[in-house]
């Protein structure tokens, strides 16, 4: 089969378009013909050696997969592997499984014509939703879990950082459904019009977000969702008002974040990490998509052989929404 393999840690030159053997499914697995595969920032972090990845090379990246079974059914793939029997799995937190892995990280993923997937990770979807479903497989599940983890109520005031990526645009869509008052921070002037078009009420500069938010809302915001990390995470915490809460899943920045401990306890702030999302979150996003309630933003499509172009575009932060690989 045709595939793009990662030959080692490094730049985009480590991504090679080649022919490899089609994988053979084992017990409780199925061979999936890949229709679309989303490009996720996780792919870049693995290639760059900034996230724990495969133990051996060559390796095939790609965690956001929509494909077709031998029966002809179209399915979306839950991207986290799980055992189904540990306490976390029994409690509906499959992404926290004791044996957890990620398709495209700990086993071969969707940068290929075919991929082997555990049967329990598959959910049937309508054939006319293949493209949009690929854009929410990991990003949408993560967005859903962030809002669930933060227990963000309807009509809340929420700051979102990193709102122009695959996860961020879906966070904004979900918050709009809850009629929240949304403030987005961006460091790209070219993306301001796109954020406005997507229905964001307030847009501030990432560099000066603390000052701008304090001017707009002297009492601070009730919630912040950070998708960037590092200094941006630190600034987002400073925008919170009393009893404010920040929920984050950010690992894209190398620098460490920091907090003012005195301010944090004086305001009784809540700091919560959010790791991926559960099978319940995954099914919820697919349901909203199928019913036409949720609409994802697709930045662009590329052919499999052009994967390197997608990585370069993401590294230059030129993406608004989700980039997809089209395999058919």
Image: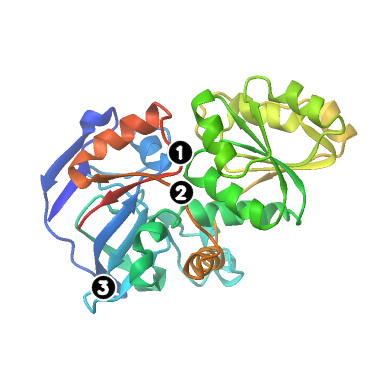
Distance of mark 3 from mark 1, alpha carbons?
31 Å
Q: Residue at left 43%, top 63%?
A: 78
Q: Secondary structure at mark 1?
A: loop
Q: Secondary structure at mark 2?
A: loop
Q: Secondary structure at mark 3?
A: loop
Distance of mark 2 from mark 1, alpha carbons?
8 Å
Other residues around mark 2 within 10 Å, as few (<14) / some (14–19) / many (≥20): some
Point out the residue furthest to the bottom here: 71
Q: Quadrant of residue 268?
A: top right
Front disc: 3 or 1: 1
Q: Is residue 199 above or below residue 33?
A: above
* Image quarter (top left, top right, bottom left or bottom right) of the C terminus: bottom left
Q: Do we see residue 48 in this rendering?
A: no
Where does residue 212 sit, x and y in percent of width and height? 74, 24
The residue beneath circle 3 is 69
Distance of mark 3 from mark 2, alpha carbons?
26 Å
The residue beneath circle 1 is 320
Other residues around mark 3 within 10 Å, as few (<14) / some (14–19) / many (≥20): some
Q: Is residue 326 above or below residue 25?
A: above
| Position of residue 1 in the picture relative to residue 269 (left or right) | left
Q: Residue at left 45%, top 54%?
A: 138
């Amino acid at each position: 089969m045709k595939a793009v393999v990662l030959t080692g840690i490094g730049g985009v030159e480590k991504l090679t378009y080649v022919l490899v053997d089609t994988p053979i499914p084992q017990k409780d697995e199925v061979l999936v013909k890949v229709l679309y595969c989303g490009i996720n920032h996780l792919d870049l972090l693995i290639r760059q050696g900034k996230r724990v990845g495969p133990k051996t090379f060559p390796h095939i990246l790609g965690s956001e997969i929509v494909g077709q079974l031998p029966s002809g059914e179209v399915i979306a793939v839950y991207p986290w592997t799980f055992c189904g029997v540990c306490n976390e799995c029994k409690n509906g937190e499959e992404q926290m499984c004791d044996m957890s892995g990620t398709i495209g990280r700990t086993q071969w993923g969707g940068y290929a014509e075919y991929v082997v997937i555990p049967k329990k990770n598959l959910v049937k979807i309508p054939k006319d939703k293949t493209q949009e479903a690929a854009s929410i497989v990991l990003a949408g599940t993560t967005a859903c879990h962030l809002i669930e983890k933060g227990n963000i109520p309807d009509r809340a005031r929420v700051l979102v950082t990193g709102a122009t990526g695959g996860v961020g645009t879906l966070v904004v869509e979900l918050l709009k459904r809850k009629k929240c008052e949304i403030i987005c921070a961006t460091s790209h002037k070219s993306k301001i019009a796109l954020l406005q078009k997507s229905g964001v009420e307030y847009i501030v500069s990432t560099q000066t977000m603390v000052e701008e938010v304090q001017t707009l809302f002297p009492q601070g915001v009730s919630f912040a969702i950070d998708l960037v990390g590092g200094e941006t995470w630190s600034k987002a915490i400073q925008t919170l008002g009393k009893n404010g809460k920040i929920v984050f899943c950010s690992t894209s920045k190398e620098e460490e974040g920091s907090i003012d401990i005195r301010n944090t306890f004086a305001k009784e702030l809540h700091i919560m990490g959010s790791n991926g999302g559960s099978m319940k979150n995954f099914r919820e996003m697919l349901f909203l998509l199928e019913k036409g309630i949720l609409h994802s933003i697709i930045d662009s499509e590329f052919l499999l052989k052009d994967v390197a172009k997608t990585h370069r575009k993401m590294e230059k932060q030129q993406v608004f929404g989700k980039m997809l690989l089209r395999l058919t």
